[in-house]
Structure formats: C-alpha cells, structure tokens
Amino acid sequence: MAGVEFAAELIATANAIAAPGKGILAADESTGTIGKRFAPIGVENVQENRRRYRELLFKTPGLGEFISGAITFEETLFDTATCGTTMVDLMKKQGIIPGIKVDKGVQPLFGTDGETVTQGIDDLGKRCAKYYAQGARFAKWRAVLHIKDSTGATPSMLAIDQNAETLARYAAICQANGLVPIVEPEVLMDGTHTIEFAAEVTEKVIAACYKKLSDHKVLLEGTLLKPNMVRSGEACETPAPMPEVAKATVRVLQHTVPCAVPGITFLSGGMSEEEASLALNEMNKLDTKKPWSLTFSYGRALQQSCLKAWLGKDENIPAAQQALLERAKANGMANLGKYAGGAGGEAATASTFVANYSY
C-alpha cells in the first residue's frame, strides 16, 4: 500500500479538506497563465504583482471559514508576503491547508488526434519531499482528455490509459512523501457533444483511473478526486440545464468512485462563477447515494470577480477580498445544498470559458 508511513496523516488531511461547508481555492496558475488573468485588468505580470495578488487572497478575512485548502504554484509556496510572513504561514493562520501543483504541463501523445499526456514524473519524488518540508500537505496533477468527435474515437483508449497510469504513479509517489494526491482527469467540455455523450466518456475515464490507482496500491482514503462535471459541450445547440448536469454527474460518480474516497472536488471547467455554484448546489440537493463530500476546487470561478475588483490597486483590496469571500461562501453553502443563488450579482454570470484550456 502506497503511503503506509504517512497513512494516518494522509487520511486526516484528505478528510479535513473535504470538511462540510468547505472546499479548495485553486490559486496554482503558472506564471504564463496568471499573466493572462492580469492582462485584462492592466496589471503587469511580474513577481511583485503576483506576490501582492496571492497575499490579497490568503489575507482575506474569514476565508478559512469556507476554504479548507489552497493549491499554489511553486513560486507562491516558497514566497514571502510583503508583510514578511511566508505565504504558507498566511494560509495556516486561516486554517487553510497549503497545497501544490506538481505536474509540468501536457505534451503531445504522438499517434493520436492531437491528444496529450501530462509530464513531470521523473523528479517528482524529490520535489514532493521538498514541498512537504515547506509545509504543503496535498498536491494536484491535471490530466487532459479531449472529445473531438461523436463516434467514440476520442478520447482514445491510448490517451485514457496513459493518463490514468500517470495519475496513479503520481498519486503513489505523493503518498510516499506525505502529500494527499488530488487526481484530476479533466474531460474538456469544448465541442458540440451532448450531455449523454459526455457522461459516457467521463465514466470511461474515471473508471480507468480507479483501476490504475488500485494497481498501484494507492490508499484511496488519503486521496481526493477532481473531475469535470458532466455537461453538454460548450458549443452544443441544446445545452442541458443544471438539474440535468447534477443528475448526470452524480450518476457517473456512483458508477465509478469507491466510497473510500473522502471527497470529490470539482473543477469549474469554464462555467461562470454563478453557474459553478448552482451546479454544485444541485448535486448536493439530490436525494440519492452520495458517500463522498461533493465540493469545489475552483480557480477562475472563485477569482474572476475578485480580479476585476482589484485592478492591481491597493485601495481596491477590501473590495476584492469581499468579492472572493462572497464567492467562497456561496460555494460553501452549495456544498451543503443550501445556496439560494444571486451571490455576486450580474458580474458572477460572466463566462470563464477558454477553449482547450491549459495552465
């Protein structure tokens, strides 16, 4: 069994992240991706501004009431805020568990129709040990699967198997070094496909991941899953409503995810802030078997309004922090199935979709 030395800690960490009413702030944008976030608000992509922004996030008063963990990029994990406190300590003061993105992005999977596999395994053990020493207690690795047709040719079994195998190897290495692995097999919602086809593909992908996790003897009680929600393609002419998204998503999870897994922390996949909250709420309202916490690990769907309120100006920090807290609270309530809607007003309905998204 992977992670035997850290078993009790891994289980405790995973359950703490999946605590009722809480979820994950995904603030792990790479240097290039955060630049794309800064560009529309006129903020230069330099380390000082990245530091100021992440400090703003982690200093938001009351954030720890709704955020149990925060995923960081390596620069942030080792950074110190302008006040002289380390970013790790800023998170810990709020009761937020520090996490770290450990994959190194996707590379072409040759012999396929533009499909990819994620890299970063070679030195992962050494990096995980370094991240644990710095205070990280969980990690994230994103695999990307593409639906490029409606015949079932994509994602190919080669892409599914290669990404599932890599996710399992990553998970075992993380656990051996004390980090809870978030397993993220994202089926991109680009395209015109129906929700029914998305369900078929997502079920195949997640099932393959749990077979490989079993083969690698990963301690499921010390893991989390970060899947896409099952939705119609972004360009589908008849997109499924949120109640249907909720039913389809939970049904796929019931078919594939063992009850030993403490929590399922959804990615937002380009939905607006409000859509991501409403979809999560609909899932938690369902009267059906849900042995895991269904919660959030949102990046764009937590930060978009915050960034627009900030605009890189210190005098806007309170307004930006209020926008973040409002969104975090909405998602915390959605985890409990008690979100009434309307948080953030019209600004929260703006799409965060980016085609073929990478970060």
Image (tube, rainbow, N blue to C red):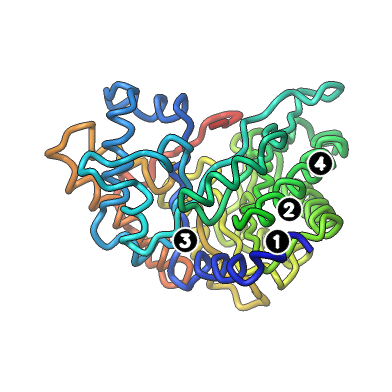
Task: Return the residue at label 4.
Answer: 160
Q: Which residue is mark 2?
A: 172
Q: Nearer the viewer, mark 3 or mark 1?
A: 1
Q: Earlier in the sequence, mark 2 or mark 3?
A: 3
Q: Residue at x 65, y 61 (%)?
A: 223
| Nearest to N terminus: mark 3 or mark 1 | 1
**Mark 1–mark 2 CB contact (< 8 Å):** yes
What residue would you read off at disc 3? 23
Comes first in the chain, label 3 or label 4:
3
Vertical position of residue 306 compared to residue 262: above or below:
above
The amino acid beneath tag 3 is Gly
Q: Position of residue 342 (x, y in %)?
A: 33, 58
Amino acid type, label 2: Ala
SS type, badge 1: loop
Q: CA distance from mark 3 to mark 1?
A: 24 Å
Viewer-side residue, 98 vs 125: 125
Contact (Cβ within 8 Å) of mark 3 with mark 4: no
**Relative to 299, is 211 on the left or the right?**
right
Q: Nearer the viewer, residue 295 or 65?
A: 65
N-terminal of the two: label 4 or label 2?
4
Which mark, residue 3? 1
| Whether label 4 touches label 2, CB < 8 Å | no
Three-letter code, disc 1: Gly
